């Protein structure tokens, strides 16, 4: 690793999200989602598309990443049945992109699902982040349509 790369990496601390953070996390999700050009028009037309259910925070399904004492991103991981879990969302402050926050959140989601006995972790991802999820071990298995447009279905196997 070069010195330049090492200096870009953030020191990430992971913790459970707090219910009182819901609106701030929704705002983070909004800003992070706007960086995807294919989704921008839909987001600007209907801001209510961005919604973090209070029960995800109350039930301990959301993981927050802090860097330098500030919220840098969050992820939501949920059981969906038959040994499958879903990485329901992973969002990083745009200015923190490329500093290891997303990778730390994806790894935390993988660990949480695996420790709960899951056999796979699924994510519905924006087209532009396919490379990120591939680097995290996810495999492309298909496409779907969401409120925001086309998206990828990617799966991370958790057991041999």
Image (cartoon, helix red, strand yellow):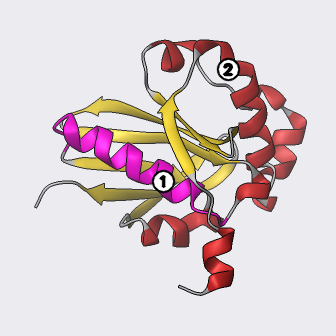
Instruction: Name the spot of residue 63 as percent of width and height, x first.
Output: 50, 34
**Measured from the top left, where is residue 120 in percent x and y?**
25, 49
Q: Quadrant of the C terminus?
A: bottom left
Q: Which mark is residue 21?
A: 2
Mark on residue 104? 1
Q: Position of residue 114 (x, y in %)?
A: 22, 44
Name which quarter of the figure residue 148 lies in: top right
Residue 81: in magenta span: no
**Which residue is pictured at 38% across the width and 31% down the height?**
78
Residue in view at x 62 percent, y 56 percent: 150
Q: Is residue 3 above or below residue 134?
A: below
Q: Nearer the viewer, residue 77 or 98?
A: 98
Q: Is residue 108 magenta?
A: yes
Q: Give the SS element for disc 1.
A: helix
Q: Is residue 46 left or right of residue 140?
A: right
Of the numbered discs 1 and 2, the one sitting upstream in the chain is: 2
- In the image, the segment drawn in magenta is 98-118
Vertical comparison of 116 with 106: above or below: above
Q: Is residue 149 left or right of residue 136?
A: right
5 shown above or below 73: below
Dominant secondary structure, magenta: helix
20 with respect to 78 (left or right): right
Spatial separation of the CA atoms under disc 1 and disc 2 = 20 Å
Count residues near mark 2 (Cα–Cα under 10 Å), then give few for <14, some for 14-19, many for 20+.
few
């Amino acid at each position: 690793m070069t010195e330049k790369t090492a200096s870009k990496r953030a020191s990430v601390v992971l913790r459970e999200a707090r219910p009182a953070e819901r609106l701030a996390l929704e705002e983070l999700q909004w800003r992070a989602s706007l960086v995807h050009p294919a989704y921008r028009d839909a987001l600007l037309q209907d801001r209510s598309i961005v919604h973090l259910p209070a029960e995800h925070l109350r039930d301990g399904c959301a993981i927050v990443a802090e860097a330098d004492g500030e919220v840098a991103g969050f992820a939501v991981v949920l059981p969906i049945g038959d040994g499958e879990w879903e990485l329901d969302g992973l969002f990083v402050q745009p200015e923190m992109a490329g500093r290891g926050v997303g990778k730390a959140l994806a790894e935390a989601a993988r660990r949480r699902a695996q420790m709960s006995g899951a056999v796979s972790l699924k994510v519905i991802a924006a087209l532009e982040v396919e490379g990120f999820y591939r680097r995290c071990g996810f495999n492309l298995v298909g496409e779907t349509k969401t409120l925001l447009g086309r998206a990828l279905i990617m799966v991370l196997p958790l057991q041999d």
